[in-house]
Amino acid sequence: MTGPLRAAGPRGRALERDLSALLGAGAASCAPADLWAMSRDCWPRALLWTKAGVAPHPPDVVVWPASTDEVVRVVRFAAERGVAVVPFGAGSGVCGGVVPVKGGIALDLKRLSGPPCIDLPGRTVDVETGMNGQRLEELLSGAGATLGHFPSSIYCSTVGGWLAARSAGQLSSRYGKIEDMVLAIEAVDGTGEILRTQDVPAAGPDLLQLLLGSEGTLAIMTKARLRCWPSPAARWMRGLRFRSVQEGMAGLRALMRSGLRPAVARLYDPLDTLLAVRSGGDAHARVPEPLRWVVEGAGGEALRLALRAPTLLNRLVESLPGASLLILGFEGDGSCASADAREEGELALRLLAPEGADDLGPAPGEKWLANRYKISYRQSPLFSAGAFADTMEVATTWDRLDALHAAVRGAVSPHAFVMAHFSHAYLEGCSIYFTFLGLAEGDTSGDPDELEEAEGRYDACWKAALSAACDAGATLSHHHGIGLHKQVFLPREHGEGMRQLRALKRAFDPRGILNPGKLLL
Amino acid sequence: MNGLRDDLSATGSAVVAEGEGLRVTPPSAVALGKAVAVLRAHLLPVRVRGNGDAPVEAPAGGALLELTALDRIAAVDGPTGIARVEAGCSVSALETAARRGGATLGPLVPSVRAGSVGAWLGGPTRGERGIPGSRRETAALSVSAVLADGRLAESRAAPRSATGPDLDHLALGGSGRLCVLAAAWVRLFPAAPPAYAAWRAPDLGAAVRMVDRLCRDRLAPVRGMLQAREGEALVALSWEGPEAARLWRGRAVRALGEPLAADAGPVVRAPASSRGIEVDARWDALAAFARHPGAAEIALYGMHAGGAFAVLSLASEGIEQCAAAARGPGLRVIAPRRLREAGPSWKEMGAGAAWDRLVAALGAVERR
């Protein structure tokens, strides 16, 4: 892996010198390893670059500010010189949102991670945005509190990244998405002004909601006040089986419309159900080859062979028994935590029985809870095996959900093996989390033609998926954001709203230095 | 002016003289867009009625955009919990239609209930209401907004999204300044019988603290009525949710103790005092009002862990005195309109220059 590690150019060295003078020695670097680390995030297409040994868009310099004041100084420095500034959290994004397509300054915010101020009686925590998610949750836990925000990236993501991309955690049906948890932020706009939204009733358009999700294009968020809650003292977990995914959707809707607040509500389509209960046994014995190779996690040639015929694989899925698994969980806190969680769970079981749910007992839910972060770390072995794996999270209202599921499955089938689960449920609708598994074909290491072909397959799959989602009336992203990856579809989502988006850019970043080339800005 | 009238009439809008200006009533969102474009071309003062602001007359030499003809309810989908409605439709008409579909908007402050959907979403509450879990969110699932040049921006109707900033918030709470809210998909709750309970409290301040505690424990009621009585106070609350209302009530009883035997329903359902002011307030600010010697009643809506919308009233004094007694940190008067407080502005948040640039970039619909 020596390809991406190129030496910095004269522009980078000059920026390193000037920014070190501005912030102090050690605050800036143009060492090749630093530039490479900030040249990408966990976008699967960027993994193809890495596998091929290329880094097409390195920054010129990396800077580590340690305070809001230092962020202001860097932004003003950059604004005077017209240099791009790309804020960087922990690089866990999956859409290329931090790829510095115009070079410039990668602003790594991890030093903004001082101790949080936790006010559990007031249900708030004040935190700097470079704080690692898992670290924050550990600190909160020490104070008997939780944010309730558990994205699968929690070990390698920051509060700032969550806010910038409107993140969602696995317990969102109880705690909400990050935009439901944030009460106020401090941010630095593209002119170097410090913006401080306030946690008090205010008038006019909500400044906070206009900055959240802006992916570093409007302002760099430096601090946040978030809602926190007492740590749950008990959990009640369950698995339920529906005869079909449609029955499962109806059950999930009935559950959310009932007023109950499950912490976990995840419905898996038949194939994802097989993967979720990967313990094998009789269920897997009925799965025809080559589908079984994929379900059982085959690698190497067997996986590549299976993925050469994605349409066949997807048709084989349709021949499976239609069972659909719902993982359900409730939490309780306080002195009656166990009884409360059980009471809500049993009420949910009574509610779901008429919808056709079979109670599988606590084991599937507890298994999911124990393994819930592991799926995120299975991607690299798949890439090594010559496949690509990616996920697409779209959302819509209940009335359109089944059609959305069918449309995306149909569109992606010729390109990749596709499965889905339904998570992040609300009163009015739900997100669908599709997983694509496709063939990256051959060995991309160091061969530009192979890389181009792999990128072509990847892009074709995504184009089909996003087109189908748009046509079905879904939003393009529920919680991963847009980044480089989805931005060409943004006008289909926003229409004339793109004019509003561009107006926001002119308002907050008139010189266009903040993360240029993202959100089509 | 005649050329202007002709141009406006050509949009399909009804145009009548009003005071020293014109009142323009478009019959559709498309006609509204065309009318906005015409008015922009003539660079006239414009006000919008039905977007959170309610000017009585057209501005001198300008036009009042009247949204009352945009009153259609295109769809009510009770099972999904959504309704498609135009901005000029009254909130009460939407509630009636929602009820027919087995759904409801939930409890709303009186000024919202008496106004239009556009006024609700574009006004000082931004369409926010309480949702299960002691949280608050806007009722607008998506909005159709006419931009200053007459184009129509329509957001996707999804429960949440991550496709950049939430552009709906240029319309929500914006009082028609940056764009005119023409229609929306609105979120509905399932209609179900509420569960009620009432308790005695030592005084009105303690009553506020009892509700505050429930909200911090994620047991937020949907509606509350706190009343000062002889030497004590009454706390009457209700919860909704087809399956969950009784559950939350039971837990509130566990937290606050055995409730009064009397049916709390009539107290909770009773209209708030007509001599009250409507506020958006934090719990501390409501507790501070409750300590005022003349404080008589606090009707609660949109409760969440941080505070609530409320109608506050004094026992024997009028609205102005009530507002004077209530004003303080963490509280903002939202009705009546003449007493409405802006709260912290973008300027106070450090974004004054950004606001000016935004207005310049978008063009303001309202020109005064």
Image (spheres, coloured by chain):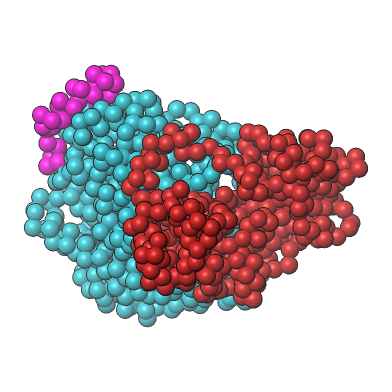
| Residue A358 coordinates in the image, percent (x, y) | 57, 73
The colour assigned to chain B within the rendered structure: red
Query: Which quadrant of the figure has residue A312?
Result: bottom left
Answer above or below: position of A455 versus A521: below
Check if residue A23 falls in the magenta segment.
Answer: yes
From the rendered image, report the letter of the chain displayed in cyan.
A
Q: Is residue A520 visible?
A: yes
Q: Please report the residue visible at 48 percent of the width from the left and 58 percent of the height from the top.
A: B21
* Frontmost residue, A389 versus B204: B204
Answer above or below: position of A213 versus A273: above
* Frontmost residue, A141 versus A79: A79
Answer above or below: position of A270 versus B22: below
Q: Please report the residue visible at 52 percent of the width from the left and 70 percent of the height from the top.
A: B69
Quarter of the image where the N terminus of chain A is located: top left
* Frontmost residue, A47 versus B63: B63
Please give left or right for residue B113 compared with residue A243 in the image.
Answer: right
Q: Which residues are magenta?
A: A2-28
| Residue A93 coordinates in the image, percent (x, y) | 33, 48
Please give left or right for residue A64 compared with residue B188 in the image.
Answer: left
Q: Is residue A256 visible?
A: no
| Residue B206 coordinates in the image, percent (x, y) | 79, 39
Please give left or right for residue A398 compared with residue B162 in the image.
Answer: right
Check if residue A3 falls in the magenta segment.
Answer: yes
| Residue A359 coordinates in the image, percent (x, y) | 59, 69
Answer above or below: position of A93 versus A402: above
Q: Please report the residue visible at 50 percent of the width from the left and 38 percent of the height from the top.
A: B345
